[in-house]
Image (cartoon, grey):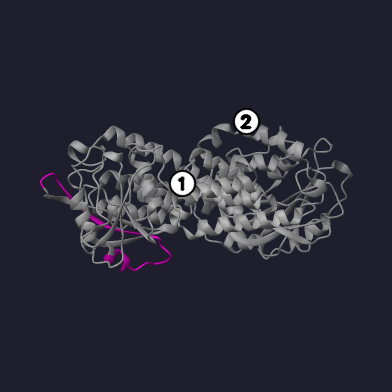
């Protein structure tokens, strides 16, 4: 904002002992900003003005800084704060336990006269983000890969946009802490209301925090379900004198451990301490039932039962009480009748005795390690739905692809996050009221898993554990001859109406839409990608990542004119970006190939 303190901030950046850095200044006040030289004390400097000329809100100025930056690692510095000379060198030298792409240090807090008031930031974990940022903006060094993946500053946050940005980073990476004070926060300066003294607006802070908690509810549920992490955060708060946050953490730990004790009592007496798993089959007594039963019985997990609901009524053949050594129960409808798909599914839920439940259509298959792979994978305590990849086979049994990948709940707006056979869910969801809705004679599984998503987190396990014979059957929800586009449109519109309140906040998160769209691109599904990326682009029409990703999705989908428009817009923002130039080159080669085929 071209305040008198800018020179002090620039001096502190230029004084870093780290040898290789650039300084990027965004003129948030527009053309009124004074000119700056191309170097500051021998450090390269670039002054970036908004186009068109205007005063930029805080998140927009931050995003312009991200777009202009050329560095592999990025570090914000407000124009009234300071970095100590060894700031960057100490963060880069920090020991990292894993692949953390964020490093932060302590910040010394000074008053208007320059006197030290104390320090902020300490060892902790992502639980802290429920209460506040993990670090001041200037104390945080982050890798540009996070920006490339969609971490941006949300224009919906006029202030506390840095807190929101840190949560976005935390959903993608761990943070490494450096136990040293490497920067100064002049907390009583400025007028944001985010500091101390006259620069503290408690009402604004509370409103922003509530908005952040609503936006990132799934992530917070996951972090706050880890009793050890919450307990550690509470201990750190107590050591640093924040009794209110400490009490909140310890109360959450007490709640979690009470729930764990209840679960332990419920699972006593299971096979070698392993929970009972119910494999649930809605059967129309097709010839493929034997194959499905064989795959359920072949599981390496030792403690399971097979429940078959005779969806065709008394016409179903009799089945033995065991199948290849596994206990089996055949359940007939009372009174006798053919059961619609949701009613047959609910009959399965009612008959199941397991702690974990898994549906298997009578024409699909589980691979032997399916259940064991899902239950053995590390998971957050809040994850009560576990899913993996499913291999898709055609009508001749030939593999043609896969479904299922890491994602977010917003994916459910367009399709299931996983194939039902690939999905294991905890029976507590059923106890809480998750059922199959008779209003959905098809896509009832999609509706059911949206219901589950309103209650818990899903966790992806990176393995292929089952087979979806997508071209078999007559539901219209598969592929090839088993696909009905009109039916799909009808029932998805019904899903959107039923769950409108659940989807509304999810669809207002461009960074999540970008992430999911990028996953579809990686899975070579440009049509799926476009649903997310075009929506993200509509929310952020100047976002360089949205422009690039939507451009590539259009390119792969054959929409060459739209692709060229978007990629050209992206390149105008970063004319020297090698990746964007290469993407346009790929587009032009595709145009040449299309023209050659027409000749």
Depth order, front residue of 547/59:
547
Residue 110 is one of the magenta-drawn residues: yes
Instruction: Rate crowding at label 1 as few (under 14), some (14 to 19) or many (20 or more) other CA atoms within 10 Å.
Output: some
Left or right for 468, reference 210 = right
Examine the rendered structure and indicate whether residue 437 appears above or below residue 9: above
Tell me residue 376's x, y (percent). 57, 62
Horizontal side of 484 relative to 551 (left or right) equals right
Q: Where on the picture, by quarter, is residue 371?
A: bottom right
- The residue to which callout 2 is attached is 497
Secondary structure at badge 1 equals: helix
- Of tags 1 and 2, the one toward the viewer is 2
Is residue 283 shown to the viewer in this render? yes
Residue 420 forms part of the magenta stretch = no
- Tag 2, which secondary structure? helix
The answer to whether residue 429 of the structure is visible from this angle is no
Tell me which corner region of the image, top left, top right, bottom left or bottom right, holds residue 204: top left
Residue at mark 1: 221
Give the residue displayed 41% in from the left and 37% down from the top.
156
Q: Nearer the viewer, residue 13 or 422?
A: 13
For the point 58% across and 58% down, which residue is it? 585
Q: Residue furthest top?
A: 497
The answer to which of 74 and 507 lies nearer the viewer is 74
Spatial CA distance of label 1 from label 2 is: 26 Å
- Where does the image place residue 91, in percent across and percent down from the top left? 30, 64
Q: Is residue 526 left or right of residue 106?
A: right
Categorize mark 2 by other alpha carbons within 10 Å: few (<14), some (14-19), many (20+): few
Q: Magenta residues, as a range? A: 89-113
Q: Is residue 224 left or right of residue 408?
A: left
Q: Earlier in the sequence, mark 1 or mark 2?
A: 1
Residue 387 is labelled as none
Vertical arrangement, residue 500 with respect to residue 466, above or below: above
């Amino acid at each position: 904002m071209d305040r008198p303190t800018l020179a002090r901030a620039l001096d502190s950046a230029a004084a870093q002992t780290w040898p290789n850095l650039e300084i990027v200044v965004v003129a948030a006040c527009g053309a009124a900003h004074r000119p700056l030289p191309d170097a500051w004390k021998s450090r390269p400097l670039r002054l970036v003005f908004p186009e068109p000329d205007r005063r930029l809100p805080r998140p927009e100025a931050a995003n312009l800084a991200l777009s202009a930056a050329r560095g592999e690692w990025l570090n914000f510095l407000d124009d009234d704060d300071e970095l100590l000379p060894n700031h960057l060198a100490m963060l880069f030298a920090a020991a990292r336990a894993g692949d953390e792409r964020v490093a932060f240090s302590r910040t010394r807090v000074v008053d208007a006269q320059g006197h030290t008031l104390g320090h902020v930031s300490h060892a902790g974990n992502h639980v802290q983000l429920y209460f506040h940022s993990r670090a001041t903006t200037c104390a945080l060094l982050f890798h540009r890969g996070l920006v490339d993946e969609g971490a941006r500053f949300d224009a919906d946050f006029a202030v506390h946009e840095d807190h929101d940005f840190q949560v976005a980073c935390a959903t993608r990476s761990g943070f490494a802490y450096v136990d040293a004070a490497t920067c100064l926060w002049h907390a009583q300066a400025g007028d944001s209301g985010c500091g101390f003294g006259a620069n503290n607006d408690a009402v604004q802070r509370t409103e922003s925090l509530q908005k952040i908690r609503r936006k990132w509810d799934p992530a917070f549920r996951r972090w706050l379900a880890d009793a050890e992490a919450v307990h550690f955060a509470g201990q750190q708060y107590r050591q640093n004198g924040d009794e209110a946050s400490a009490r909140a953490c310890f109360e959450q730990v007490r709640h979690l451990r009470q729930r764990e004790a209840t679960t332990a009592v419920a699972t006593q007496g299971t096979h070698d301490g392993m929970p009972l798993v119910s494999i649930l089959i809605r059967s129309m007594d097709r010839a493929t039932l034997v194959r499905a039963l064989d795959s359920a019985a072949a599981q390496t997990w030792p403690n399971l039962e097979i429940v078959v609901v005779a969806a065709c009524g008394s016409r179903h053949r009799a089945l033995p009480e065991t199948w290849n050594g596994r206990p089996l129960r055949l359940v007939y409808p009372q009174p006798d009748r053919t059961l619609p798909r949701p009613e047959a599914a609910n009959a399965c839920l009612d008959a199941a005795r397991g702690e974990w439940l898994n549906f298997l259509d009578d024409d699909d298959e589980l691979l032997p390690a399916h259940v064991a792979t899902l239950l053995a994978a590390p998971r957050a305590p809040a994850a009560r739905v576990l899913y993996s990849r499913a291999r898709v086979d055609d009508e001749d049994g030939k593999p043609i692809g896969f479904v299922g990948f890491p994602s977010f709940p917003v994916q459910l707006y367009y399709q299931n996050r996983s194939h039902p056979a690939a999905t294991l869910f905890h029976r507590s969801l059923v106890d809480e009221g998750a059922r199959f809705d008779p209003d959905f004679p098809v896509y009832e599984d999609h509706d059911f898993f949206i219901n589950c998503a309103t209650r818990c987190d899903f966790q992806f396990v990176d393995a292929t554990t089952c087979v979806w014979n997508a071209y078999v059957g007559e539901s219209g929800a598969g592929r090839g001859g088993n696909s009905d586009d009109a039916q799909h449109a009808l029932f998805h519109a019904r899903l959107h109406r039923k769950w409108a309140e659940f989807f509304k906040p999810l669809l207002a998160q461009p960074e999540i839409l970008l992430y999911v769209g990028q996953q579809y691109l990686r899975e070579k599904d440009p049509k799926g990608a476009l649903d997310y990326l075009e929506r993200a682009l509509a929310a952020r029409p100047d976002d360089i990542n949205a422009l690039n990703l939507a451009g590539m999705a259009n390119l792969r989908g054959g929409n060459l004119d739209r692709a060229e428009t978007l990629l050209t817009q992206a390149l105008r923002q970063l004319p020297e970006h090698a990746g964007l130039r290469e993407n346009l080159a790929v587009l032009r080669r595709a145009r040449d190939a299309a023209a050659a085929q027409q000749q």
